[in-house]
Image (cartoon, rainbow, N blue to C red):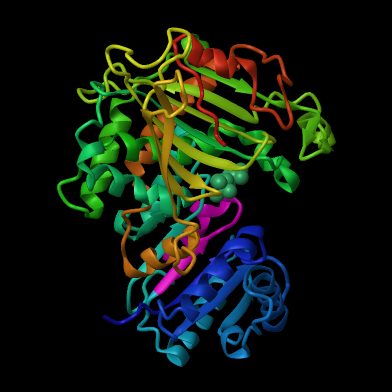
């Protein structure tokens, strides 16, 4: 099989995402021989740069990422080209078209074109439509459009954006990125579930008491404060990453591992999520915003003090919620999710808690019998841990909790490719399985919108958790009232 080839056009090429993720991913794919040598990258952005300035920028991005001993060869950098664009100007598209066509001849890329929108979301629709209007979409080979999040800021805006994009591109050409779907352990959820009888058979409301999904960050909002302040944690993390993980945990086995089959099972989960009435939001979702605190021994400012624009902000930097899935498999099993900025550590983890044995033979009354847990460590460690009970050799103690752990980080193998690397390659290969379908986006916005509507009705009492902590106390109460508690993320 031939490795895929294309001209990759990155809108927003001078931005943070391109620098941190996209250039290093292209570099790795290129050097691992996963994409054809015949590849050219066009950086498109406002800045009046030339090719040389752009190549220096790409080089800097790679030096930060890849082994610094390694020289970044000019033969690689020479494939990067820059075009200064105003995305509302016809002449920009004409110039781009001219450059792409020239590169297609030089690099013999079979006319394949990937347009990657990694810039301010308000321009996604305009760019998609202009790519169509000025003929850039109609190359000799395939054309694919990759769209970063946020895909809208509520259902109506997402719908509007989708209509704009769909006027220009077919659904099969649109790749909506959710980078969590490129994470090794998120992809592993399906394999763990569907390749193991001991989990597959027990994966339902008869045997599972609750599922907890956590993604915590120690970083704050940094220079993204302007965007973040309008978004908040529920739009930034829950509408996409958290609900995507939930869908993979809850979906029925697909009949085949094909894009449409997997997507349609995920869509059914979104359809089965019990809607939360705005007036009842407090029973299901709680929000938080960090105050001043300490992380790793360093003092940290409160969210509102990070920038004057954030003063008296009501934006949430933490969310915890309980989601119920009203279907045959999951009726009665709460899925708890939790995510926040400026928490004690950066970690993402899924805990599946199994129901206890009907009778406790081995533990004292006061010693709560440890339930079996399947823990999927998404990051920074990648692995799985199974919590069991086994005989103790301590006098007077009959049983004790033990853990069976498997860590991918220790396994001798080339370090797993980063999420973006895998997703870029998937897109070039035309595999959209790990990208979100419009129906998933629409249904998840619908779910989120009523939470936000409920929150708008009352002014939150912020800040309500300390930077460097585990989040607000209300997040604990959310589980306690159901008789559960959060399992530690360490
Ligand atoms: C992004 C959010 O989608 O995901 C960021 O916009 C967040 O706010 C990031 O920091 C988290 O991703 P990861 O891969 O670092 O867990």
Lateral position of residue 264 relative to residue 134, left or right: left
Question: Residue 262 in the image: x percent, y percent?
Answer: 25, 47
Q: Is residue 246 above or below residue 161?
A: above
Quarter of the image for residue 253 reads top left
Locate the N terminus and report the quarter of the image it occupies.
bottom left
Quarter of the image for residue 272 reads top left
Q: Is residue 374 above or below residue 123?
A: above
Closer to us: 369 or 223:
369
Lateral position of residue 240 relative to residue 292, left or right: left
Q: Residue furthest front?
A: 395
Locate the C terminus and report the quarter of the image it occupies.
top right
Question: Residue 205 in the image: x percent, y percent?
Answer: 26, 22
Question: Residue 190 in the image: x percent, y percent?
Answer: 30, 46
Lateral position of residue 458 relative to residue 290, left or right: left
Q: Is residue 8 above or below residue 252?
A: below
Residue 18 located within the stretch drawn in magenta: no
Q: Is residue 444 above or below residue 371?
A: below
Closer to us: 5 or 137:
5
Residue 134 located within the stretch drawn in magenta: yes
Q: Residue furthest left?
A: 255
Q: Is residue 288 visible?
A: yes
Question: Residue 246 in the image: x percent, y percent?
Answer: 38, 35
Image point 50% across, 27% down: which residue? 487
Q: Is residue 159 visible?
A: no
Lateral position of residue 163 relative to residue 95, left or right: left
Closer to us: 460 or 1:
1
Image point 49% across, 86% down: which residue? 103
Quarter of the image for residue 386 reads top left
Magenta stretch in the rendered image: 113-135
Counting every numbered tag in the picture gives 0
């Amino acid at each position: 099989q031939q490795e895929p080839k294309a001209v990759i056009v990155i809108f927003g090429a001078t931005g943070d995402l391109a620098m941190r993720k996209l250039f290093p991913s292209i570099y790795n794919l290129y050097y691992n021989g996963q994409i054809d040598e015949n590849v050219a990258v066009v950086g498109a952005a406002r800045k009046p740069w030339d090719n040389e300035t752009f190549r220096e920028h790409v080089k800097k991005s790679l030096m930060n990422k890849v082994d610094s001993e390694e020289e970044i060869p000019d033969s690689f950098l020479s494939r990067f080209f820059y075009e200064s664009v105003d995305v509302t100007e016809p002449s920009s598209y004409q110039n781009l078209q001219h450059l792409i066509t020239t590169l297609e001849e030089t690099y013999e890329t079979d006319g394949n074109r990937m347009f990657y929108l990694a810039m301010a979301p308000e321009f996604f629709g305009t760019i998609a439509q202009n790519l169509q209007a000025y003929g850039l979409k109609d190359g000799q080979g395939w054309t694919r459009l990759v769209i970063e999040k946020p895909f809208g800021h509520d259902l109506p805006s997402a719908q509007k954006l989708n209509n704009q994009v769909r006027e220009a591109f077919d659904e099969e050409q649109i790749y909506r990125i959710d980078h969590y779907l490129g994470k090794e352990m998120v992809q592993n959820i399906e394999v763990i579930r569907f390749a193991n009888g001991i989990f597959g058979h027990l994966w339902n409301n008869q045997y599972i008491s609750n599922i907890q999904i956590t993604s915590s960050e120690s970083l704050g909002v940094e220079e993204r404060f302007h965007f973040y302040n309008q978004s908040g944690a529920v739009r930034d993390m829950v509408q996409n990453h958290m609900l995507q993980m939930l869908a993979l945990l809850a979906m029925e086995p697909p009949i085949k591992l094909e894009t449409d089959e997997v997507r349609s099972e995920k869509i059914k989960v979104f359809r089965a999520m019990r809607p939360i009435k705005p007036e009842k939001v407090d029973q299901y979702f709680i929000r938080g915003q960090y105050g001043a605190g300490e992380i790793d021994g360093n003092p940290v400012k409160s969210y509102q003090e990070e920038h004057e624009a954030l003063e008296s902000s009501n934006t949430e930097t933490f969310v915890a919620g309980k989601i119920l899935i009203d279907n045959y498999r999951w009726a009665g099993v709460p899925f708890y999710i939790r995510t926040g900025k400026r928490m004690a550590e950066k970690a993402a983890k899924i805990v599946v808690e199994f129901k206890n044995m009907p009778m406790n033979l081995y533990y004292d009354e006061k010693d709560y019998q440890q339930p079996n847990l399947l823990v999927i460590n998404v990051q920074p460690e990648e692995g799985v841990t199974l919590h069991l009970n086994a005989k103790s050799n301590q006098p007077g103690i009959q049983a004790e909790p033990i853990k069976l752990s498997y860590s991918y980080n220790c396994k001798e193998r080339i370090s797993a490719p980063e999420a973006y690397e895998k997703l870029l390659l998937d897109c070039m290969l035309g595999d959209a399985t790990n990208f979100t379908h419009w129906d998933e986006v629409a249904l998840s916005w619908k779910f989120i919108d009523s939470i936000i509507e409920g929150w708008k009705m009352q002014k939150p009492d912020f800040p309500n958790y300390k930077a460097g902590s585990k989040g607000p106390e209300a997040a604990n109460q959310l589980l306690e009232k159901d008789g559960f508690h959060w399992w530690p993320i360490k």
